[in-house]
DNA sequence: CGGACAGGATGAAGATTCTCATCGCGGACG
DNA sequence: CGTCCGCGATGAGAATCTTCATCCTGTCCG
């Protein structure tokens, strides 16, 4: 079983390699950033699994992962991150990632997950995927009305009021009022701050 | 690796056994219903994994699974079902189940999942868990107000108006009005029908 | 039979949500 | 410099949500 590990955090990467190599039947190759990983793949793409760090030079959010998946559709590609939120993990999986590995995972679980993914299955820690669903959303989301949530969603996608209005099939002033109201509710003073607060709360 | 399979559907159970036994290192024991499974466990509880069918005599929803988990906390218990909805799977996992297996799973994935769970990990098919999140809920849930949804949830748990009122900290007549309104919205003519419609829609 | 109780219906009131028209401010562009 | 565009704020109306008091129907039990 041959695995490519790409992470700019040396210590973590080395620990990971040590754990996996100790399993006997796992061969690991390392890269420090996305470019290096792609160079390695260009020379030899016979890997069972590629692990990419989410916060690694060259990744650019999920774009880097998707590029690798497009270029090597026969390889399972999984995302690692110590800080990524649940929405990011969900998007990665929706985009077809073989899995999502938070760096809080135990060594034992990690080895199991790696083997699992190398066999072509899709993995994610279920406590991570399900647990946070209730609390952080309801924290803020429960305070907002249906419309306000839709407006906030548009906002987090970088849309202008006019675009949001068109999407929701209402006039622009309506969107503006929703904006103002939801500012008050979540304690933001302008649209940028509102978008950041929504992100912090794990929304969208 | 020793596994207990409890399912009242003979054909499926036998197929499952055949697949798993063909892996060489898996030993399977079978039961036809929950009572039989518990009898087997009473004599010998050295199992790595117990697979329970959701629609099996004696299960009574998730209660049967939880009973087994309480009696044998050292054994991984997983739920199988061909018809269970996502909310049920989520509740099972939240209750501490080792996993959820829809019967649509491929044989290969199933064997991987079984091995995975027997090692103490938690498994669920991610496409099943993530995909259905939007459509079936929004169908009906989007029409109902926050309060009406809470009332409907209480209804699907078999509570009386008075109980729901106490839980929500309002007077009973208020609950009654919410009931009446949500009947109209979802097209039900009485509380029983409303509860069934909610279940059919995959709510709660 | 009389009462207790649960479910369902009606009327009414206040709060919230949703919609829009209008005004003011600041930056960008010709 | 004038104009346009996007953002934010205000005022106002309609619709909806939420709450409750009150009545009417059954059913079950003493």
Image (cartoon, coloured by chain):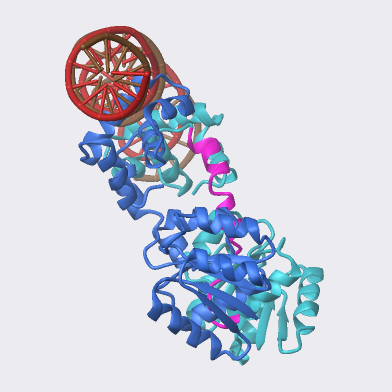
Chain colours: A cyan, B blue, C brown, D red
Q: Nearer the viewer, residue A7 or B72?
A: B72
Percent coordinates x, y for residue A202 in the rendering: 56, 47
| Location of residue D10 with respect to A169 vertically, above or below | above
Tell me: A156 left or right of D30: right
Percent coordinates x, y for residue A101 in the rendering: 64, 66
Is residue A131 rendered magenta in the image?
yes
| Location of residue A182 with respect to A115 vertically, above or below | above
Residue numbers of the magenta segment: A118-142
Residue B164, visible in the rendered structure = yes
> Residue at image x 28%, y 34%?
B182
> Residue at image x 59%, y 71%?
B40
Percent coordinates x, y for residue A107 in the rendering: 75, 70
Is residue B18 rendered magenta in the image?
no
| Location of residue A131 with respect to C4 vertically, above or below | below
> Residue at image x 53%, y 81%?
B111
Tell me: A184 left or right of B150: right
Percent coordinates x, y for residue A42 in the rendering: 59, 88
Residue A194, visible in the rendered structure = no
Q: Quadrant of the N terminus of chain B?
A: bottom right
């Amino acid at each position: 079983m041959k695995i490519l590990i790409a992470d700019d955090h040396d210590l973590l990467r080395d620990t990971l390699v040590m754990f996996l190599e100790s399993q006997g039947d796992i061969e690991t190759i390392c890269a420090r950033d996305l470019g290096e990983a792609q160079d390695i793949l260009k020379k030899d793409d016979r890997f069972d699994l590629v692990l990419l760090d989410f916060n690694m030079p060259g990744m650019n959010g999920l774009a880097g992962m998707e590029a690798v998946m497009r270029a090597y559709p026969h390889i399972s590609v999984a995302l690692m991150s110590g800080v990524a939120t649940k929405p990011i993990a969900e998007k990665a999986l929706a985009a077809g990632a073989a899995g999502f590995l938070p760096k809080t995972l135990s060594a034992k679980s990690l080895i199991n997950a790696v083997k699992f993914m190398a066999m072509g299955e899709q993995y994610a820690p279920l406590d991570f995927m399900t647990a946070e669903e209730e609390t952080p959303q309801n924290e803020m989301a429960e305070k907002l009305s249906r419309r306000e949530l839709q407006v906030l969603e548009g906002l987090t996608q970088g849309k202008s009021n006019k675009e949001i209005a068109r999407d929701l099939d209402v006039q622009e002033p309506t969107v503006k009022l929703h904006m103002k109201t939801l500012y008050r509710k979540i304690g933001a003073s302008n649209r940028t701050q509102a978008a950041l607060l929504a992100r912090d709360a794990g929304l969208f």
